[in-house]
Image: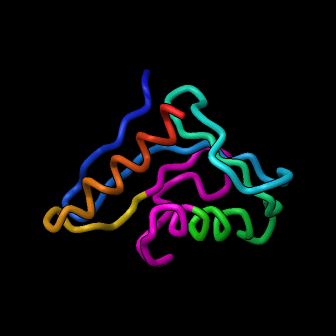
Amino acid sequence: MPFTIQEKPDGLTFKIRVQPRSSRNQVAGIYGDALKINLTAPPVDNAANKACGAFLAKLLSVPKSSVTIVSGHTGRNKQVMVRCPKSGGGRDFIKKAIMAWVSA
């Protein structure tokens, strides 16, 4: 199944695969139907989840509070929601930025 971004009333959701304890924070391409993200944070005490939200928020130029892990809090496979309004063009910008990571 290919990588997809789902539109919800309050934002966009997509799947990620997190690799904690990496040498640097980076988007590392596609892993199955998910976006692979390498993080330097360890997978203990919610550190990797917090680092993941902060990293994605920085890349997408949105507040940290706009990025939420919807499911997969204790595993490597997660579903993320980026809260953004349908109007104003912000949603299109975020979709294009995410798809640029997929094709890179």
Specify whether 89 is left or right of 77.
left
In the image, the segment drawn in magenta is 56-80
- Which quarter of the picture shows residue 58? bottom right
- Name the outermost residue toward the top: 1
- Which quarter of the picture shows residue 87? bottom left
Specify whether 32 is left or right of 48.
left
Residue sitting at x 51%, y 68%: 57
Height in image: 58 above or below 39? below
Specify whether 20 is left or right of 17.
right
Quarter holding the N terminus is: top left
Closer-to-camera residue (8/94):
94
Height in image: 104 above or below 81? above
Q: Position of residue 94 (x, y in %)?
A: 35, 56
Q: Position of residue 76 (x, y in %)?
A: 67, 46
Q: Is residue 65 one of those drawn in magenta?
A: yes
Q: Is residue 75 one of those drawn in magenta?
A: yes
Residue sitting at x 41%, y 50%: 97
Height in image: 79 above or below 66? above
Q: Position of residue 75 (x, y in %)?
A: 67, 49
Residue sitting at x 50%, y 76%: 64
| Number of numbered labels in the structure image | 0
- Which quarter of the picture shows residue 5? top left
Quarter holding the C terminus is: top right
Q: Position of residue 92 (x, y in %)?
A: 25, 53
Residue sitting at x 28%, y 61%: 11
- Name the outermost residue toward the left: 87
